[in-house]
Amino acid sequence: MANWNAYNPFSRRESHSGGSIIAYKIFTLLSWLLSVAVSVYYVLHAPTDGFTIRRRIWDQNYLYPTAFTMNSVLGDIYWIVLFILQLSYIAHLFSRKQEVVNWAATVGSHFILNNLLHFAFVMLFVRSHFAWAEVMLIINFINLSGLYFRHSTCPRLIHVAVASGPLAWTFVAIYWNGALMVHHPHNLVARIFGNIFIWSILAYGAFFIFAFKDYTMGFALSVLSAAIGVAQFQRQVIALQWIFAFVIMSVLFIATVVVAVPAWTGRDAMWRRSGPEADAERDPLLE
């Protein structure tokens, strides 16, 4: 088992060798650039290869209206902020403080895999290979869930950039892409199932907010719920889906504020400050 842990890139380590740190710096940066490049390119351009229906990311979103169609503006804002946060995480790998570098390297393997799976998902999604795209999302959901629960004490900024932000998106994207796999996703049966499954976003967010006091997950899911709500309202005013989406957004946002305010002011035991000089970014997420 000891030998396996030595070679397993996903095993937990208290420290990392100089060679592994260099490898993490290179592969983390390259995989992130790949993820950003493919996302930006296919937001602006449609693929020109293959024989399937090929569209830009948000053109696919609107070409097949479903119960989980999102507003592209809010979706773009979400990803721009997430990419910026991830760039901040990458900067941790180049910190002069060894403790910070070790924290960043500890979650590096999961982050690199997330970037590669996101790349694969986008390449498949824009070419209408929704079934294979769903497989990529499910694998990434497992990867990010493992990251979340195995490295729950990582500093807050790292947690948002590599765990809660990507995990919230992946969870919602499983429904978003999954709805596109359904034949005639706009019919009554599909809409009814959509009206039911959208509540899983509330349940999922509430689990993290109340079980782990993770307001970052609650806020991320509230933004994605808003993206669904706006798109559903623009598509069909007389419908339940946009009402449900905005209710979910509101409940998650209120719950997020209830948990976040005590954490920010240092009154919550789950986010204790070690002293007046404590850095809020490095407070542990879970005890």
Image: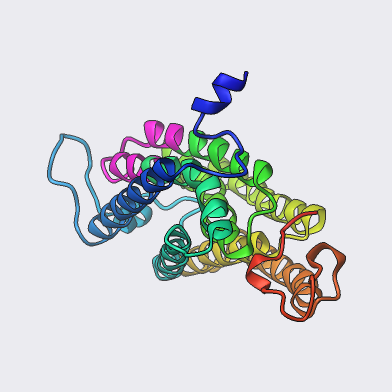
Residue 101 visible in the shown view: yes
Q: In which quarter of the view is residue 217 placed?
A: bottom right
* Residue 225 falls within the magenta-colored stretch: no
Left or right of 262? Residue 248 is left
Residue 187 visible in the shown view: no
Relative to 26, residue 254 above or below: below
Q: Residue at x 63, y 46 (%)?
A: 148
* Residue 122 falls within the magenta-colored stretch: yes
For this orientation, the residue located farthest to the left is 48
Circle count: 0
Left or right of 212? Residue 129 is left
Left or right of 186? Residue 22 is left
Q: In which quarter of the view is residue 218 placed?
A: bottom right
Q: Percent from the top left, x then y, of residue 238?
A: 57, 66
Relative to 143, residue 93 above or below: below
Main SS of the magenta segment?
A: helix
Q: Residue at x 76, y 55 (%)?
A: 286
Q: Percent from the top left, x then y, of residue 215?
A: 70, 65
Q: Nearer the viewer, residue 209 or 72?
A: 209
Q: Residue at x 51, y 69 (%)?
A: 230
Q: Nearer the viewer, residue 76 or 27?
A: 27
The stretch of residues the image draws in magenta is: 117-136
Q: Percent from the top left, x then y, of residue 154?
A: 64, 55
Q: Nearer the viewer, residue 151 or 202?
A: 151
Q: Residue at x 63, y 69 (%)?
A: 281
